[in-house]
Amino acid sequence: MSVTAAGAGLCLRGRAGGMLRCFGLTNSLEAGLGLGERALDVLRGFGLAKELEAVSLPMGTEVNLLANPRGRPVELHRDELYKHRSLHWSDLHRMLIDALPRGTVRFGHTVAGIEQPGGDAVVVTASIAAPRGAKVPEGDFQAGEADPGAREPRMEEFRGDLAVAADGQMSATRRRNVPAGDSRRYSGYCAWREAPAEAAAARAAYPELGRALYFELSDARTHAVLYDLPGQRLNWLWYVNQPEPPLKSHSVTVKADEGKIADMYARAAETFSPALSALMRATQAPFINAIFDREPLQRWAFGRCVLVGEAAHPTTPHGLRSTNMAIEDAGGLAAALAAHPRDLEAALAAFQRTRIPDTTREAYLGNA
Ligand SMILES: Cc1cc2nc3c(=O)[nH]c(=O)nc-3n(C[C@H](O)[C@H](O)[C@H](O)COP(=O)(O)OP(=O)(O)OC[C@H]3O[C@@H](n4cnc5c(N)ncnc54)[C@H](O)[C@@H]3O)c2cc1C
């Protein structure tokens, strides 16, 4: 079977044999990520147990603290069976890319269309040029495929048995296939975030960093998340209720100016315990993600094209679930294709039967 994936956010390793191509725009992801047991098991099942161990840290405990701006936070609850691991997004991507034959993942390719001309084929059209400003990692761009001096990007067609649309929460493939009324919903809050370099004071105040995930909950109806990442980086996020910020193009990331950052530092000092607000203050360039979701779909497969990941189920992130769900989709789709190697319709039906109820529940929980 020949599978073409739009969006290199995830890779379908362990598929039902045959050929795989993944197209993406960039691979410049600096933030941190927590993965739970089920997603970790999928990656281990892809033969990546050792690599995973090497690039991630254990987060075996979840600790919920009540924020105290005047001193130490108070412990409210702990879950010793949390069984997550933390890692850098870029390491996860690199690990997946390196596990595939060289050339499988092609950055600098923008999927422009997915056509189903009838019969047994799907045709993916990609323009071979990186979008302006995109940071395409050296070595991943297919040398000789694009002429940097060319006025028009070169278009190329790829024929296959199945197209997997992993093109994220603003998925053009979803827009083309799902009827009107499927607009994104602003959740009512944004996330401030960054992973500053080593901060000794925070480590002293949160002694389980490196093996635990901390939530600091404020009675001002807001909370922050703190955990350790490989390379001595502490990853923090602060979810803040606020009106929807103006966004440029499709990006949900907002660059904060100096005034906004100073205001955030001041509000953090009134909201969180001193060690956490000092860590936030020590962060040079915190940025903001606006948080959106969409009403869950009842169907992800459209003939020989299937949605996965955020394209299928954009979900609010504070349960640390959405990349986890995208990885579980990859595992579920690979298993369904392996179980029905000669019947794509049956494979996609089995995939949707197993994954849609699960992700729908998670999406509603994320809104609760
Ligand atoms: C603040 C915050 C914290 C989060 N923390 C966690 C966490 O700890 N754990 C967790 O599980 N999840 C977390 N998430 C969720 C996570 O960011 C997303 O769920 C995840 O990135 C979705 O993966 P994806 O591959 O489906 O989509 P994306 O990561 O959006 O990838 C889509 C890819 O498709 C490419 N693309 C788009 N259009 C095209 C095209 N036409 N042609 C080619 N390529 C295209 C894009 O360039 C991109 O690379 C968090 C999210 C936020 C905002």
Image (spheres, rainbow, N blue to C red):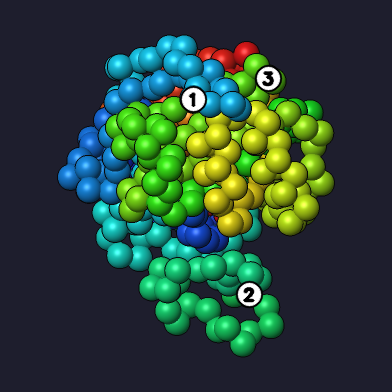
Mark 3 vs mark 1: in front: 1
Callout 3: 10 Å neighbours few (<14), some, many (20+)? few
Q: Position of residue 264 (x, y in %)?
A: 70, 42
Q: Is residue 334 above or below residue 21?
A: above
Callout 1: 10 Å neighbours few (<14), some, many (20+)? some
Mark 2 vs mark 3: in front: 3
Tag shown at residue 72: 1
The residue wearing badge 2 is: 153
- Name the residue nearer the viewer: 97 or 88: 88
Q: Are marks 3 and 1 in contact (CB under 8 Å)?
A: no
Q: Amino acid at mark 2?
A: Pro
User: Mark 1 or mark 2, which is nearer the start of the sequence?
Assistant: 1
Q: Position of residue 50 (x, y in %)?
A: 18, 45
Mark 2 vs mark 1: in front: 1
Say which element carries label 2: loop
- Quadrant where the C terminus lies? top right
**Is residue 64 among the parts visible in the rendering?**
yes
Q: Name which residue lies at 37% across and 37% down.
A: 204
Tag shown at residue 221: 3
- Name the residue nearer the viewer: 183 or 161: 183
Tag shown at residue 194: none
User: Mark 1 or mark 3, which is nearer the start of the sequence?
Assistant: 1
Q: CA distance from mark 3 to mark 1?
A: 19 Å
Q: Position of residue 169 (x, y in %)?
A: 62, 40
Say which element carries label 3: loop
Q: Amino acid at mark 1?
A: Arg
Q: Is residue 244 above or below residue 103?
A: above
Q: Amino acid at mark 3?
A: Arg
In the rendered image, the residue lying farthest to the front is 70
- Name the residue nearer the viewer: 124 or 330: 330
User: Mark 3 or mark 2, which is nearer the start of the sequence?
Assistant: 2
Left of 329 or right of it: where is 318?
right
